[in-house]
Amino acid sequence: MANSDSTTGSRADEGVSAICAKYDNRPDALIEILIDLQAERGCIADADIAPLADTLNLSRAEIHGVRSFYSDFSSAPKGRVSVKLCRAEACKSVGGDALAKAVEKRLSVQLGHTSPSGDVSLEEVYCLGNCALAPAALVGDRLLGRATADKIANAIGKSKT
Amino acid sequence: MTHPTIIWVPCDSAARSVGADAVAETLAVEAAERGVSLEIRRNGSRGLFWLEPLIEVDIAGQRIGYGPVDVSDIPALFEAGFLTGKPHDRHVGPVEEIDFLARQTRITFRRCGLISPLDTNDYESHGGWAGLKRAAILPPATIVEEVTRSGLRGRGGAGFPAGIKWKTVLGEQRTPKYICCNADEGDSGSYADRMLMEGDPFTLIEGMAIAGLATGAEHGFIYLRSEYPDAIATMNTAIARARTAGYLGPDILGSGKAFDITLRRGAGAYICGEESAMLDSLEGKRGEVRAKPPIPAFSGLFGQPTVVNNVLTLATVPMILSEDPGPEGYAALGEGRSAGTQPFQLAGNVRRGGLVEAPFGLTLRQLVEDFGGGSLTGRPLRAVQAGGPLGAYIPVSQFDTPMTYEALAEIGAMLGHGGLTLFDDNVDMAEMAQFAFEFCAEESCGKCTPCRVGAVRGAETMAKIRSGDSVEDNLVLIEDLAEVMVDGSLCAMGGLTPMPVRSAIAHFPEDFSADGGKN
Ligand SMILES: Cc1cc2nc3c(=O)[nH]c(=O)nc-3n(C[C@H](O)[C@H](O)[C@H](O)COP(=O)(O)O)c2cc1C
Ligand code: SF4
Ligand code: FES
């Protein structure tokens, strides 16, 4: 917005403005906006909070609070490929815990962490809606059923190319 | 020129999770190499997941199934003559006659797996839009009355009568009003919402539009969890197509009434399935539970009158408003106040995992044994968790319980969203009890102390019990904590976490003894 140049010029961020504009700068679309930002940049950095607050007419504390509430959002960059491993009951009933250990070993990443190279982040989630073909994992946008460490490693390979 | 043979290959994400896309591609390549003319169509899943990828060859209008098909089976399938329905190891016969499917009563899921999910004409030729067409010429009160008469109760977990909720919103004078579809489906062991949104999305759109006409709401939101990228994509396309075809927009089917839908994604928070937390999330806020009253029907989204219903509740409405089965036909199914059909979902350690839509009242044993075929591992079953992470663990001795809201409540269990997770005799129930607390600690919105603190203390205490540390004292402490959580929690997250814990202790005390049940 033209009149905000003088006060917020230093914070202006074209990427943030473009995403917000997609949602008509509606504050109630904040979750959608953060999802897009997270997808585009791999995180919602501290530096993004001020331009978001200005554009959406929200306080920085509100945006901060929302970022920290939802597990899909992170302030530090996540890996280029996200691996979400289901840790819920149906997956546990068919060896989900053993799979989790095997995957940690295979990828050399601990659950909840990102590999040092920044290639892969391994996250715990609770149910992927594939409970009849458990254990399940989501690699990027690709759902895996009857998942094994091999299948997961393969899917990571594919989503990198 | 002869017509190409039609082959259906599911595009459902669970089917894709075990290779359906590769099967579709390989079928096309093989057919081209053999000079065979094929038309590959993508359907939703029938919900027979142990057979996925399940492909269906259309032979003179009858669909002959082969599954589970691996890419490596495909040359042999051609050689065996699968295009004319010939035998092969993977041959499962006419799909509609497979016992698992033939014994169901599919109403909500009648089209799922049958049609091309995003084809409005296919939808219409299978009975779609009939309910909306009727609703467009009925007075709102009549629509509400029909939904009430059908006995339809909320399928999201609480089982509140849908018609009564709608009536309250219809009676509110303030506008705008909203229809919010709860597609957060966070309960482990359930996947029916996902299957429906991927396999028959127009049913949900139609149900929401009817809800709009019935209550005077002109706008709807679908709150869809981020863990379901395929469902998000399918629903977005379906909404756009329904709009183009005039089923959504400023004047629905000439009724002079407007209704449109916006899809909003979740961002990985189980508590956002709780309706008031979902509403806050839809407003762009942290998903914190609101104190009740007021209920959403009076003060929901942006403080306005709002209907909140689960995907399955809304997706059943078109059939209630149509003639097949209509409100009376629907109410005639089921048992007592558990009217109609319930989509049960068999999950976890199960031989034949999948969706079973059947009238309320069949027993848990029928579901897990007759339909499910017992455990996947072949070992004896030990427990079934019904109704997701907040639901009870039911022991084999209670498998003859009829599946109704009332009978389950009597044994201290609940139906929830209809997910049934099977466990064989390798399960450690103390570990599952600890997990119940850990899950609550992880997913609690943090607003009230009994839940926030109780869950953490519960998990710590259960860990001590598992290591054999002052087992009896600690079990007393667990019971105290459970009582505080049940009595003092603002919502069912904290209030129901004791259900899996207490049922595990009550039915499997041997797993909580000083030796940890190890002998
Ligand atoms: C912790 C918690 C999680 C819930 N998760 C869901 C959910 O994922 N989907 C859903 O439809 N209802 C869920 N509910 C129930 C909703 O609060 C609400 O009752 C329901 O959406 C109303 O729709 P219905 O009457 O059609 O079932 C949850 C409730 C609680 C307490
Ligand atoms: S019971 Fe738990 S989830 Fe529910 S309001 Fe209290 S803290 Fe939040
Ligand atoms: S419990 Fe793992 S996919 Fe549902």
Image (spheres, coloured by chain):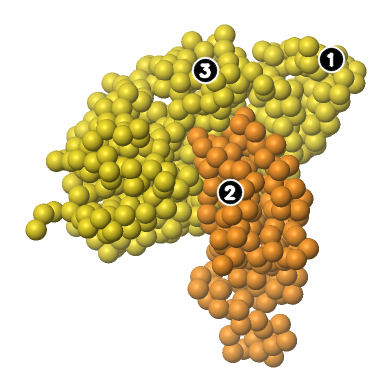
Chain letter for mark 1? B
- Percent coordinates x, y for residue A22 in the rendering: 50, 73
What residue is disc 2 on? A151
- Percent coordinates x, y for residue A109 in the rendering: 75, 53
What residue is disc 1 on? B515
Mark before the other along the chain sequence, 3 or 1: 3
Q: Separation of disc 2 and disc 1 at Cα?
A: 38 Å
**Quick one: label 3, few (<14), some, or many (20+) residues within 10 Å?**
some
Q: Residue at x 43, y 36 (%)?
A: B49
Between marks 2 and 1 in the image, the one whose residue lies nearer the viewer: 2
Q: Are marks 3 and 1 on the same chain?
A: yes
Chain (orange):
A
The front one of B444 and B188 is B188
Q: Colour of chain B?
A: yellow
Q: Is residue B1 visible?
A: yes
The front one of B5 and A91 is B5
Q: Are marks 3 and 2 on the same chain?
A: no
- Percent coordinates x, y for residue A20 in the rendering: 56, 73
Between marks 3 and 2 in the image, the one whose residue lies nearer the viewer: 2
Q: Residue at x 70, y 22 (%)?
A: B429
Q: Secondary structure at mark 1?
A: loop
